[in-house]
Amino acid sequence: MKVVGKIISISELSVKVLLKDDNVELRDILVCNFNDQEYKFEVVELEENIASLLPFKRVNGLKKGIEVSLDEGGLQMEYSSSILGRIYNSYGDGIDGVKAKSKTKRNVYDRTLSVAEISVKNNPLWTGIKVIDFFAPLQKGYKMGLLGGAGVGKTVLIKELINNVYKKFQSNAIFIGVGERSREGKELYDEMKADDLLDKMSMVFGQMGESPCARSKAVYSGLTAAEYLRDENNQDVLVFIDNIYRFIQAKSEISTELKRIPIENGYPTTMASDISEVEERINSTETGSITSFQAIYIPADDITDDAVQSVTTHLDGQIVLDRKVAEKGLYPAINVFKSSSKAIDPEKIGRRHYDLVQETLKYLSRYEELEEIIAVLGIDELSEQDKLIFYRSRKLRNYFTQPLFVSENYTGIKGEMVDIEDTLQDVEDILNGVYDGIDEEKLLYRGKLNGESRKEEEPIEQ
Amino acid sequence: MGTHIEDLVNQKVEQIKNKENIFDSGTVIKVKDYIIEVSGLENVTYFEKVTIWEKGMGYVNQINENSVTVAIVKENAPIKIGDIVKTTGEQFKAVFAKEAIGRIVDIFGTDLLSGKAFEKIKYINIENETIPIMDRREVKRPMLTGIAGIDLIYPIGKGQRQLIIGDKKTGKTQIALDTIVNQGSERAESENDVVCIYIAVGKTKKEIKTIYNELLKRGALSYTTMVVATNDDKQPVVSLIPFVGLSIAEEYMKMKKDVIVVIDDLKKHADTYREISLISGKTPGREAYPADIFYLHARLLEKGCQYKNGGSITILPIVETKGGDITDYISTNIISITDGQIVMSEKEFAKGNKPAINYKNSVSRLGGAVQKAEIKSLGAQIRRTFLSYLETKEVYELANMDEMTEELRNKMKIGAQMQEALNQPKFMPLSNEEIIDKFEAIVKQEGYTNEN
Ligand SMILES: Nc1ncnc2c1ncn2[C@@H]1O[C@H](COP(=O)(O)OP(=O)(O)OP(=O)(O)O)[C@@H](O)[C@H]1O
Ligand SMILES: Nc1ncnc2c1ncn2[C@@H]1O[C@H](COP(=O)(O)OP(=O)(O)O)[C@@H](O)[C@H]1O
Ligand SMILES: [Mg+2]
Ligand SMILES: [Mg+2]
């Protein structure tokens, strides 16, 4: 390898090199060896003959004056069907101990889609999760955001979607772990392997204990893998990302280290373009599609956060999870008023579904007001009409809880998938008072209600 | 344009010729609290230990083009401009000593009770690379605290990171101490040896001694080390102490031991780190914390795991909140790292419910996966009914009891019994069997309905 310069300064998250070669470009990979250790870096800034580098790992033990060389080809990811069944780190190295010869590799940045290439189609995609199918139904090729503060159920939902959508449709999938727990990554891998489901999936991890460089690169490497499946194998691909917020977070750490002036809350000025660069790659073409599910962390429970907003502009639909709902033990803890999708349109889901959504939202928003009144006056003071709305809304609320396959460890109940037709029927029944005489508790953590419960529990006259 | 740089380089070469010790020594050119700038030290490595002649010790925290920034960890006499700084050729390291069990030690491995160093020691890195994903195993063995509200409802497994969060004086430290003491009885039955490490982050000496006495009184010191930074230690010491404690934990884990680490507390740690960052000139982000505050805690807490060799590190970090708000920046950061949280509430404490756990906001992300079959389904059932009781109680509090359905009235009665059964004095651990007996009696009585 060719020596291109030597180190002149070192701080925790960045290194500067005095170049003696002007062939170095942004995003090149530089390497050095010192005390039996290999250190790798990516070039992130060039100013005259000084390059700022991001270290792949920690820089303890490194010193000034060490020579660095250029690693030709830049950051690359395997670009062949041998990605399936494998697990990689952010830099495209397999970490599962499998000895597989690389067939072809591709630079992780070399792909942008033109407007002409992008295809938009409308095929519904049902998930079997009541709240999603009802309030924020999705279509093939959609970008679905799962937003929530810390610990409100994003990962649980992502895993349930892997369970329901990936398993059911037997499509190819890429899981990208960005800045989340290593434990969860390993567990997902073990579960997929145990269920023999790894063969159609590939995973890339840059988790929270790793450097900001690693955390930001996982996205590019993962997308390169997804593009292989879409562009070369012409497939419909599912991409799961947990968590795309961590990508921006890593970018802010990097930008702070480079002493760039931040916008509000320390986010980099380039935030919008950073996120667009990756989001624009997650699209469908005439020959293959990418449907993506992206968990989005909401820092400090502040949904107006700039980074969160910069991601949501790219979405076709969003599920917002709410701590206030989780506190009540109602899971999935979705905020129905903030969750929706572009498919909520009578032309796409049909008049009946559309009207039921509107009616349900009307009930639930009145319920919110009534809750406040009750806190002061008690239930007895409500008008008969309001009482009806109050009780039916509580039933709707309970009905939208659901035992999930992956939450058995928390609920102790076996998971269930629910067909959208059943959901529509049940919601209609609740709104029409079919379940008025039934204790609201009976609607908690159920799959579908219709049929069996209608016969068994004839409405009791009041 | 590069001529300026070239000039600098030439200048430096010139300097080197004139002054041969520019490689291994330097002089202080700037002092800013505990951060100093040194010129010279051309040969120093990142995070190397350096000595400030006859005055103190520090580590290299930045290597600049023309100087080196050093964070001071020990200062015996005031450091001044012109003081001589020397390289040591070694990284700044922590000390591992088996003799430290039962003792209170500081960052330099000094036994604070005797004031002496230990005899048999091994130098270890203060921070190792994060444990690779593929070296981790499923967290599934129970780590019992002896507290019913935890072992039954929000269980903790060996290798789990479970946050204890709440306002001042709500019993956070107590939960950790109960857990450590309970390992005494657990140890007899466990296949692995258990080691506990209590890390004090900037606590007062009195607080530290009080905790020491509590543990001593209950025989817990035969398997516990206290690794401490007191509030009059240098800030860089306070910010490194949790890493030192966890590095010691990693040593034990690699010997196949089950280690339980308490960090008291991470809010203080975050504030210390913020202070150092601001003094070092880093750009402030949200609430003036630097952008890498999440990474700091993430890489610390990612050291908790079930390791492939059978050993494990369980971490119980503590975070202090204000006004019961767990949604502030640092708290949510840490909640998003840990595998669950036990929320302590001032309101419950005032009502006399102890431990003052807020069951609505508490979570165990591993849940039943870390419980034995006998207690698992009972736990899930109690959690569901109890949460549902708490929620209903709020809504129907103003409703007339007489007008309630019988079902609802029963629910209220049984919920209240559960609350009573969850109350537990400190240092009075319950075994799984005792917990099961107590709560089965409640769910088996007449009028209890299990919705599912
Ligand atoms: N289960 C319990 N039974 C009896 N007393 C308890 C219990 N839990 C906590 N206490 C008491 O409550 C007080 C506060 O507990 P502790 O010091 O653990 O709180 P903390 O939240 O760590 O406080 P600080 O803000 O000082 O760190 C102590 O006196 C402790 O003994
Ligand atoms: N659908 C659900 N059913 C039951 N419990 C849930 C559900 N979703 C989340 N939880 C509870 O909330 C915790 C946090 O969920 P998780 O998905 O890990 O949060 P996030 O990824 O948003 O931080 C879970 O460990 C579980 O205890
Ligand atoms: Mg998550
Ligand atoms: Mg305390």
Image (spheres, coloured by chain):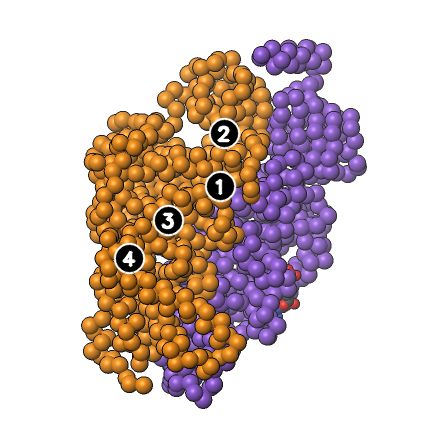
Mark 1 lies on a secondary structure that is: helix
Residues behind callouts 4 and 3 on a single chain:
yes
The chain painted orange is: A
Mark 2 lies on a secondary structure that is: strand
Q: Which mark is residue A133?
A: 4
Labels 3 and 2 touching (C-beta < 8 A): no
Comes first in the chain, label 4 or label 3: 4
Amino acid carrying label 1: it is Gln
Occupied quadrant, residue A398: bottom left
Mark 3 lies on a secondary structure that is: strand
Comes first in the chain, label 3 or label 1: 3
State the image coordinates of residue A381 (x, y, percent, origin top left): 47, 81
Q: Residue at x 44, y 68 (%)?
A: A368
Location of the C terminus of chain B by quadrant is: bottom left
Disc 3: which residue: A145
State the image coordinates of residue A294 (x, y, percent, origin top left): 37, 46
Disc 4 vs disc 1: which is toward the camera?
A: 4
Q: Residue at x 40, y 59 (%)?
A: A337
Q: Residue at x 53, y 62 (%)?
A: B343
